[in-house]
């Protein structure tokens, strides 16, 4: 050390100079966006701008009701988006809180408690159980020191630490692994004590490098937003063109340019697809509510739809596939007998002594997950009586002997209980070769299955003059105890459902390859290659892209490698969902198309970087989210297909009278009344539609596939065109036969309503037959149908309503004709479905078994 000594630490002057030179021990603040800046960025979104423009236009037209509805949706969307975007700004702030705890340091020979941000390089940190480590450091003293580095590695078990053989920082420092001399900022001391010399602070620490990586990443923009922005722009341009055409036709054919402008505004507003942003707002808000009911918190609503189209799901192991708790799963006796522990099945008496000895070799008040499991196994066997002995002496784990012993005194006899690494216990027991070979075979058999193995032994001290070392006693091998983090019961079924849905599940873990492969097999993850972090580091991007096709398990992976894996999958055109919980996962969560964080054990950093949070840390919730995402996507397509279709006859009936010199049929009030039917149908009826039968049996849609495809638009335009042709025929025939204008307007209006209802029923399902589509449960549709019937009855029976709408009284025969047109349209379109279904199947084999989804 150049400044201070190992015993006295830095001087106050040296620490002050180092702080000025290196800067405080904290992460640099990113340029945070203000709420006003976020709001301005939100208002620049084309969808929202169109919604606001529609509201303002309706205000100019004097239609206050429709204007207020649109402006209310716009305000709601702005508020929700600003709140969500503001929360994402807290990612680095949460990371800063973790990286800057208070610290106990040695300066000028005295111990001093200082703020974590004041720790500098070459400071001596005093570490005690329960301390949050303030900086990356190398140990110069350690007594049975263990640290929980799960924030950086994702692995829940603490790792043992050892004093550096040479005091220096020349060797590569990486979190995780037993026997390291390095401790890391943000990790937690779970056992023992020590003194460590600081090597790196602030952005130069491991947690700081993750923070810098996080600050440079941009979250993936939801595909739904991009595609909807594109189609809304097209539709707005189309609506503007039609409105201009109406103005020109009216002005040139009839004169009166002021009337022409007013007619053009009315027609343009009838064609503006303000339903698109309304549909997306309602669908995604309702989707977030529905998914919240199954324990999933949505931080960015559009991510639900994206999750529904995921092609690769990268999951960590601990706590997601497994229960994140150690339990005793296997017992082995020196006689060669083995017992696999199962819930609700009693442990044979022959193994009771092994379980009791393992528990007595642990801390009386355990904090280590494995020791907690050993005590739990003892408590689960009623036949094992509680110990009445007192702890007389203990030998701690040492780097040169990975075993610990407790000496118990019951007043008459002394007993030693020991546990530790199998090779360490074997050396204490001085096992002959054949017994050592038998034990080694048992250890390897458990290790292949991903089981962690502890050996257990006993000895009897001769007297109370405690020996200096455990090696001075004569131990006898009691047996082996196998511990594992059990897989969640719901995982195999959830993984199988992912596979049937065409989603590739890949496990990424910091654990060893054998353990990872074992858990992957139990989870039902497809057989494939195992790629370790060391092997991955030796591959360039091209080689990695080639290996990705066969790899299903990534083991011993470091944080920046997780990010590289995600980016490699994305570069290969995959839609990537990534699960995680630690600080180390935050960059990959943010880089993935859908970041999925754990709610219970996840860090604030991981949750803030993610789009979706699993409140119960259950892998099965991801599958339910995929199912809901696909349902939302399907229903959005149904709603959009309906919107395209329904605007065709409205636009056609607006233009038709101009070409034939006939009276204008619909004014703003009629259009507003039609919108009162269209908007609830789009936003409520289609949102409530249940999922298609094959929703989890089809492959994810092609990532390059457009939401608004040419086949979908063509089918929608065909539906609307057929409806318009039928309405135009009736309109022209009745006009030329001399039907009065007010009666003709009423007939055409009611016929249009009937055809709108027909379009609803046709587009309710991709695959269901007409009869099923009519009777399948949808409470929202029933309410909308009742409202339509009520409004129709009011118009028919209230003269004041007829006068307001400029309707004449309509004969029952004409009403029957109007309803008949709707029924005929529905039958004709149903007859066309099989043909369209065959055509679209050729275009898109991955689409649902239906016509509209044939993108």
Image: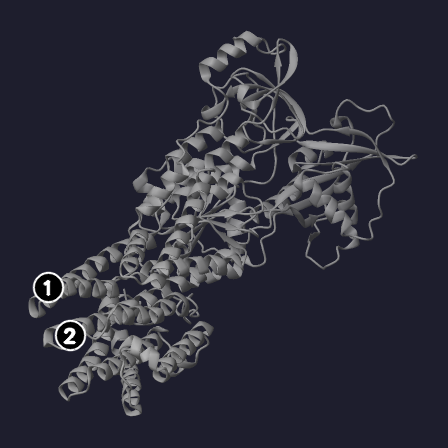
Cα distance in 3D space between marks 1 and 2: 14 Å
User: For the C terminus, which image quadrant?
Assistant: bottom left
Could you tell me if the residues under marks 1 and 2 are in contact, i.e. CB atoms within 8 Å?
Answer: no
Q: Which residue is mark 1?
A: 248
Residue at horizontal 59 percent and vertical 28 percent from the top: 179
Pinpoint residue 5: horizontal percent, then vertical percent.
Answer: 59, 9
Whether residue 700 is visible, yes or no, is: no
Q: Position of residue 712 (x, y in %)?
A: 26, 67
Q: Residue 125 appears in which quarter of the rendering?
A: top right
Side of 473 where 259 appears, left or right: left
* Mark nearer the N terminus (1 vs 2): 1
Residue wearing tag 2: 656
98 vs 79, nearest the viewer: 79
Marks counted in the figure total: 2
Question: x and y percent of residue 199 in the render?
Answer: 51, 20
What mark, if any, has residue 630 been given in the picture?
Answer: none
Q: Residue at x 42, y 55 (%)?
A: 304
Is 800 situated above or below 400?
below
Depth-wise, is mark 1 or mark 2 nearer the camera?
1
- Drawn side of residue 805 relative to residue 331, left or right: left
Secondary element at tag 2: helix
Q: Nearer the viewer, residue 401 or 662?
A: 662
Q: Is 548 located above or below residue 664 in the figure?
A: above
Q: Residue at x 31, y 65 (%)?
A: 640
Q: Position of residue 725 (x, y in %)?
A: 19, 79
Mark 2, other Cα within 10 Å: few <14 / some 14–19 / many ≥20 = some
| Residue count near mark 1 (Cα–Cα under 10 Å), binned few <14, some 14–19, many ≥20 | some
Colour basis: one colour
């Amino acid at each position: 050390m150049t400044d201070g000594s190992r015993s006295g630490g830095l001087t106050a002057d040296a620490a002050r100079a180092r702080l000025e030179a290196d800067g405080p021990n904290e992460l640099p603040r990113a340029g945070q966006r203000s709420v006003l800046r976020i709001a301005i960025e939100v208002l620049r979104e084309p969808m929202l701008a169109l919604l606001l423009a529609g509201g303002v236009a309706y205000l100019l037209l004097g239609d206050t009701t429709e204007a207020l509805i649109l402006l209310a949706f716009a305000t709601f969307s702005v508020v929700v988006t600003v709140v969500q975007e503001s929360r994402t700004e807290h990612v680095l702030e949460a990371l800063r809180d973790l990286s800057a705890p208070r610290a106990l340091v040695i300066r000028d020979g005295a111990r001093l408690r200082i703020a974590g941000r004041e720790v500098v390089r070459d400071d001596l940190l005093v570490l005690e159980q329960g301390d949050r480590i303030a900086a990356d450091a190398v140990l110069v003293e350690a007594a049975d020191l263990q640290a929980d580095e799960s924030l950086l590695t994702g692995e829940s078990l603490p790792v043992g630490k050892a004093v550096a053989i040479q005091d220096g920082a020349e060797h590569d420092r990486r979190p995780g692994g037993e026997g390291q001399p390095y401790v890391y900022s943000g990790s937690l001391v779970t056992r023992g004590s020590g003194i460590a010399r600081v090597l790196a602070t602030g952005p130069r620490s491991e947690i700081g490098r993750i923070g810098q990586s996080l600050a440079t990443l941009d979250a993936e923009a939801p595909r739904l937003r991009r595609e909807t922005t594109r189609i809304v722009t097209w539709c707005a341009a189309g609506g503007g063109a039609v409105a201009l055409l109406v103005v020109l036709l009216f002005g040139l054919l009839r004169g009166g340019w002021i009337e022409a402008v007013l007619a053009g505004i009315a027609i343009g507003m009838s064609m503006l697809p303000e339903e698109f942003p309304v549909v997306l707002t309602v669908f995604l808000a309702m989707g977030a509510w529905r998914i919240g009911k199954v324990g999933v918190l949505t931080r960015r609503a559009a991510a639900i739809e994206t999750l529904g189209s995921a092609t690769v799901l990268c999951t960590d192991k601990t706590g997601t596939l497994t229960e994140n708790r150690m339990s005793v799963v296997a017992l082995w006796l020196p006689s060669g007998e083995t017992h696999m522990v199962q819930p609700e099945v009693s442990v044979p008496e022959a193994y009771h002594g092994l379980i009791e000895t393992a528990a007595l070799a642990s801390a009386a008040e355990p904090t280590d997950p494995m020791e907690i499991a050993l005590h739990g196994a003892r408590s689960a066997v009623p036949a094992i009586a509680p110990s009445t002995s007192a702890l007389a002496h203990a030998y701690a784990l040492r780097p040169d002997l990975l075993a610990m012993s407790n000496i118990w005194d019951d007043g008459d006899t002394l007993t030693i209980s020991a546990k530790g690494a199998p090779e360490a216990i074997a050396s204490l027991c001085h096992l002959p070769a054949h017994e050592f070979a038998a034990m080694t075979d048992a250890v390897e058999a458990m290790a292949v299955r991903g089981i962690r193995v502890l050996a257990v032994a006993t000895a009897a001290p001769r007297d109370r003059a405690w020996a200096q070392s455990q090696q001075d006693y004569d131990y006898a091998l009691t047996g082996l105890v196998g511990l594992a983090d059990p897989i969640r019961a719901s995982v195999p079924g959830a993984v199988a459902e992912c596979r049937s849905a065409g989603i590739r599940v890949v496990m990424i873990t910091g654990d060893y390859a054998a353990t990872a492969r074992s858990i992957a097999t139990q989870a039902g993850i497809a057989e494939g290659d195992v790629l370790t972090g060391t092997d991955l580091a030796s591959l360039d991007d091209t080689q990695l892209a080639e290996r990705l096709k066969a790899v299903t398990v990534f083991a011993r992976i470091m944080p920046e490698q997780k990010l590289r894996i995600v980016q490699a999958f994305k570069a290969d055109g995959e839609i990537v969902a990534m699960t995680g919980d630690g600080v180390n996962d935050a960059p990959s969560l943010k880089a993935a198309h859908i970041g999925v964080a754990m709610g219970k054990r996840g860090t604030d950093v991981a949750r803030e970087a993610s789009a979706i949070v699993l409140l119960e840390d259950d892998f099965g919730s991801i599958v339910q989210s995929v199912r809901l995402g696909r349902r939302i996507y399907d229903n959005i397509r149904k709603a959009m297909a309906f919107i395209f279709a329904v605007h065709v006859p409205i636009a056609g009936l607006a233009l038709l009278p101009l070409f034939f010199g006939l009276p204008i049929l619909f004014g703003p009030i009629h259009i507003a009344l039609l919108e009162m039917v269209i908007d609830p149908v789009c936003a409520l009826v289609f949102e409530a539609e249940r999922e298609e039968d094959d929703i989890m049996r089809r492959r994810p849609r092609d990532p390059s596939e457009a939401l608004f495809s040419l086949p979908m638009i063509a089918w929608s335009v065909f539906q609307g065109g057929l409806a318009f042709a039928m309405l135009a025929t009736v309109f022209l025939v009745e006009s030329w036969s001399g039907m009065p204008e007010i009666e003709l307007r009423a007939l055409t209006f009611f016929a249009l309503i009937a055809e709108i209802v027909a379009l609803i029923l046709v587009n309710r399902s991709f695959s269901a037959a007409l009869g099923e589509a009519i009777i399948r449960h949808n409470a929202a549709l029933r309410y909308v149908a009742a409202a339509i019937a009520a409004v129709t009855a009011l118009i028919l029976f209230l003269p004041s309503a007829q006068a307001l709408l400029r309707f004449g009284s309509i004969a029952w025969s004409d009403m029957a004709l109007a309803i008949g047109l709707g029924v005929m349209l529905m039958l004709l379109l149903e007859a066309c479905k099989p043909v369209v279904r065959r055509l679209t199947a050729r275009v898109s084999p991955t689409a649902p078994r239906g016509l509209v989804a044939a993108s």
